[in-house]
Image: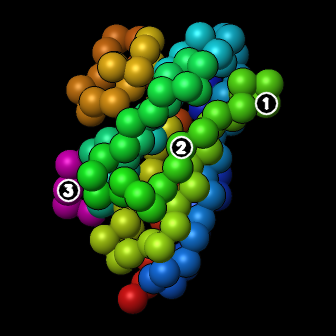
Amino acid sequence: QVQLVESGGGLVQAGASLRLSCAASGRTFSSYAMGWFRQAPGKEREVVAAISRSGLSTYYADSVKGRSTISRDNAKNTVYLQMNSLKPEDTAVYYCAADRDLRAAMVVTATPQRRWGQGTQVTVSS
């Protein structure tokens, strides 16, 4: 099974940028579609972005569309989330997840195949 470790979170001011990384180990990384999710205190987990196994197809939630870019490097077993123009409402714990395909990776409801990372905190001050 794939193991996922996120990094790159931190405390930034509104308007700043961050790049989150999710490093995978275990089974073949390229066989998984990948997703980024976030959960703010007192709120349900929500999808942020997802990317297909090849990286050719992507999905973005409306809340981050135009401000964020998901990408992957299958040679490095890593998926990235570049976030620009950060807002206080982006504050949350960000999780990456591996799933069977893009359609599964872009929804919150997890398939039995989904694997989660431990999360990384992003805090955006106003």
1 vs 2, front mark: 2
Q: Residue at x 47, y 73 (%)?
A: 85
* Magenta residue span: 41-45
Residue at disc 2, secondary structure:
strand
Mark drawn on residue 70: 2
Magenta region includes residue 72? no
Q: Are marks 1 and 2 in contact (CB under 8 Å)?
A: no
In this figure, which residue is indicated by the disc labeled 3? 43
Q: Residue extending furthest right? A: 75
Task: Judge whether residue 6 can be spotted in this image.
Answer: no
Three-letter code for the amino acid on which mark 3 is drawn: Lys
Q: Is the residue 86 above or below the residue 77 in the image? A: below
Quadrant of the image occupied by residue 112 = top left
Residue at disc 3, secondary structure:
loop
Q: Residue at x 66, y 11 (%)?
A: 27
Q: Is the residue 30 above or below the residue 10 in the image? A: above
Binning the other alpha carbons within 10 Å of mark 2 as few (below 14), some (14 to 19) or many (20 upward) gives many
Does residue 68 appear left or right of residue 126 in this picture? right
Where residue 123 sits in the image (x, y, percent)? 46, 72
Q: Residue at x 60, y 19 (%)?
A: 54
Q: Residue extending furthest bottom? A: 126
Binning the other alpha carbons within 10 Å of mark 3 as few (below 14), some (14 to 19) or many (20 upward) gives few
**Sequence-first disc among 3 and 2:** 3
Q: Are marks 1 and 3 in contact (CB under 8 Å)?
A: no
In this figure, which residue is indicated by the disc labeled 1? 76
Q: Is the residue 93 above or below the residue 37 in the image? A: below
Three-letter code for the amino acid on which mark 1 is drawn: Lys
